[in-house]
């Protein structure tokens, strides 16, 4: 084989090695995205498991707030059953809103706010919400990394033909959080 033949074989081998390296990186990134989404669903399950205890505690004090309590119970597992990132995010946002309404109900009952069981459940919920927020950020970071690799050149030459595509970001479509709240203070009296 001539020198030109060896150079061509060498270039082909280098291109194949590069394609294998890109493929392996994309597989790793896709696995990280799946793992990150799994982390979100774990936190959503923890929250869904905590909700009946929280509702039961509130129920003992707030018997006439039945509609809020029923809605929270009815939708507690929606996020874990959604199946898609978009569906999960939508159900998660709905549950976050319902939990906010539940906490507003709890504010109206001073005895409930002083109940140690309620306070412990509320603390657990706050911890879960913090971990859920971290899980969402981690998921979006892994999706960003995957998307950058799938969209950039030259990895796109390997990614598209092998079936790799961009992943959806976990986002809240609530338009009320897209703008800063208006804050006003009463004028000082002299």
Image (cartoon, rainbow, N blue to C red):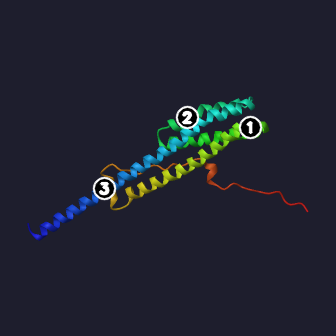
Q: Image quarter for residue 186? A: bottom right
Q: Residue furthest front?
A: 116
Along the line of sight, which residue is nearer the eye, 27 or 178?
Answer: 27
Front of the two marks 1 and 3: 1
* Residue drawn at 18 percent across, 65 percent down: 10
Disc 3 is placed on an element classified as helix
Q: How many marks?
A: 3
Q: Is residue 172 visible?
A: no
* Location of residue 117 with respect to 8 vertically, above or below: above
Q: Which residue is mark 2?
A: 77
Which class describes the residues within 10 Å of circle 1: few (<14), some (14-19), or many (20+)?
A: few
Q: CA distance from mark 2 to mark 1?
A: 26 Å
For the residues labelled 1 and 3, say whether their Cβ atoms are less than 8 Å apart.
no
Position of 140 with respect to 111 (left or right) is left
Along the line of sight, which residue is nearer the eye, 37 or 163?
Answer: 37
- Residue 171 at x, y = what percent? 54, 49
Q: Which residue is mark 3?
A: 158
Q: Which mark is residue 115?
A: 1
């Amino acid at each position: 084989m001539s020198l030109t033949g060896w150079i061509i074989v060498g270039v082909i081998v280098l291109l194949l090695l590069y394609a294998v390296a890109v493929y392996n990186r994309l597989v790793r990134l896709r696995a990280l995205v799946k793992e990150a989404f799994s982390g979100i669903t774990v936190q959503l399950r923890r929250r869904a498991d905590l909700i009946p205890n929280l509702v039961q505690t509130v129920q003992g004090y707030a018997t006439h707030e039945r509609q809020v309590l029923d809605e929270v119970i009815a939708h507690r597992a929606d996020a874990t059953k959604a199946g898609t990132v978009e569906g999960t995010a939508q159900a998660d946002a709905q549950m976050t809103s319902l939990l906010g309404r539940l906490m507003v109900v709890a504010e109206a009952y001073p005895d409930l706010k002083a109940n140690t069981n309620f306070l412990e459940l509320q603390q657990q919920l706050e911890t879960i919400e913090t971990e859920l927020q971290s899980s969402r950020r981690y998921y979006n970071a892994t999706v960003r990394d995957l998307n950058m690799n799938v969209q950039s050149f030259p990895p796109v030459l390997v990614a598209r033909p092998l079936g790799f595509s961009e992943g959806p970001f976990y986002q809240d479509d609530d338009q009320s959080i897209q703008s800063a709240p208006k804050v006003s203070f009463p004028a000082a009296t002299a």
